[in-house]
Amino acid sequence: MKVALVNLPYPIQVVREGRCQHEAAIWDTVYPPLELAILAALLRKNHDVLLVDAVGEKLTEEQTFDLLKPFAPDWMFAPVSTPTIDNDLKVLRRVKQTFPQIKTGIFGVHATYFARSLAQSPVVDYAIMNDPEDAVFELVNGRIPKSVAYMDEDETVVVMPPESHVDLNRLPTPAWDLIKKENYILPIVRKPYVLMETGRGCPYRCIFCVVPYFHGKKPRMKNIEKMVQELQDVRPMVEDIFFHTDNFTFDPDYVKTFCKALIQSGLGFRWVCNSRVDTIDEEMVRLMRDAGCWLISFGIESGDQGILDGCKKGISVKQAKKAIQIVRENGVMASGHFIFGLPGETEKTAEKTIRFATTLPLNFAEFYIATPFPGSELYESVKDTLSLKWDSIGYDKDPYESYLDLRGLKKRGYRSFYLRPVKMFDLARTFGFSKLPYLALSGLRFLSATLFKK
């Protein structure tokens, strides 16, 4: 079989990767296509595989089809997302017109939630639910798996819910040799990087998050021996990693053992990861630092305890302060993520969040609007009261029509955090004054796009 694995073209830089469905933001980069690279590694032993990241390569729709036509695929699989789904289906319509015999499959959070309705579309042969690896492998090899929705010969939609999530230890090292690494440059260090995951799933109940719905409430961790092997496999290609694990520090013992193994391997990676403020301690942070971690991103969300409790975050403002202090005192950078518009939000609580962000010793901060992505509890609470267009779902868009100027608050958060002389000096001192022109250009580009976007 000829199998095309395609991150579909889109007018702007977007991320469709696992839980993430957003525009390229402060990191000023799209993610390397982890899921497509895993699928490519699974299939290429027995099939011809073409991996096209139209977003990462900044390909137009025409350029994308210029690559697909000579390949003439039998199958195409593509990740879709809520904000891009209308355009995704438009591109797939052209795929069907160009290759009349092709079979198409889509995956991602949106495809999982709306599997039944998407399977009724004439441009979608299979809507894959949850982890796509097993389903894609079975489909290409001529079998109908669990975890798909499709239209049968009687034009009846068949929905086959997944019985379990994929065993991550069975997955091969992603086929990163199929991507152009120069398209994925990690900001600040300005080096090529790839995504890796130590596990999937999260047991926490944050109402804005889709991870428990999509990857499951029970974390599935890869064997540490497998992780070290994967790192050895990619070391000839890059020296920078973003661990795209849903919650990298969920299991402190795992993290500490993994970091010790990474140190012992001598591979010398630099890496960043996500975390929660209630799952770290000093010993862990020191080991992470010694193993190559230089930045940890925390979902802090709000500076108001009532808002945190209302969104079921399960953390305290005090824990956030302590976690950031531990990280910074042990020589690791910290990034904080904050959300405006969660249930109970007022001008007062939003201003409290902005003040909190500026008082923490964070190196970076990102500000979002509470976004009701299908699959989250937040979406379930508002779906019957909002008239939503899918392209209105995004971290910089306000679908609520409330009295709060959420977009204005988001801009105010960025201005308050970054346009401080002390912050500008801190960034220059941290990264070296020789990088000041690059930092200034990158920062101005991002802030201009953020502050002046209509």
Image (cartoon, rainbow, N blue to C red):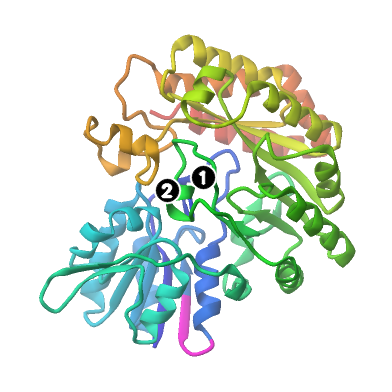
What residue lies at 74% left-to-right and 65% top-to-bottom?
A: 224
Q: Name the residue under label 2.
A: 12
Q: Whole-percent x and y of residue 287?
A: 85, 48
Mark 2 or 1: in front is 1
Res. 405 visible in picture:
yes
Extreme residue toward the left, this view:
154
Residue 264 vertical placement versus 178 (above, below): above
**Residue type for callout 2:** Ile
Give the residues drawn in magenta, as a range: 45-50
Q: Crowdedness of circle 1 by 10 Å Cα count: few (<14), some, many (20+)? A: some
Residue 325 placement (x, y as % from top left): 79, 27
Image coordinates of residue 176 in percent, x first then y, are: 61, 71
Provide the residue designation for mark 1.
24
Local secondary structure at mark 1: loop
Using the rendered view, name the quadrant where residue 438 is placed. top right
Name the N-terminal-most of marks 2 and 1: 2
Name the secondary structure under disc 2.
loop
Report the amino acid beneath label 1: Ala
Instruction: Please tell me which residue lies in front, 422 or 62.
Output: 422
Q: Which of 285 and 189 is in front in this view?
A: 285
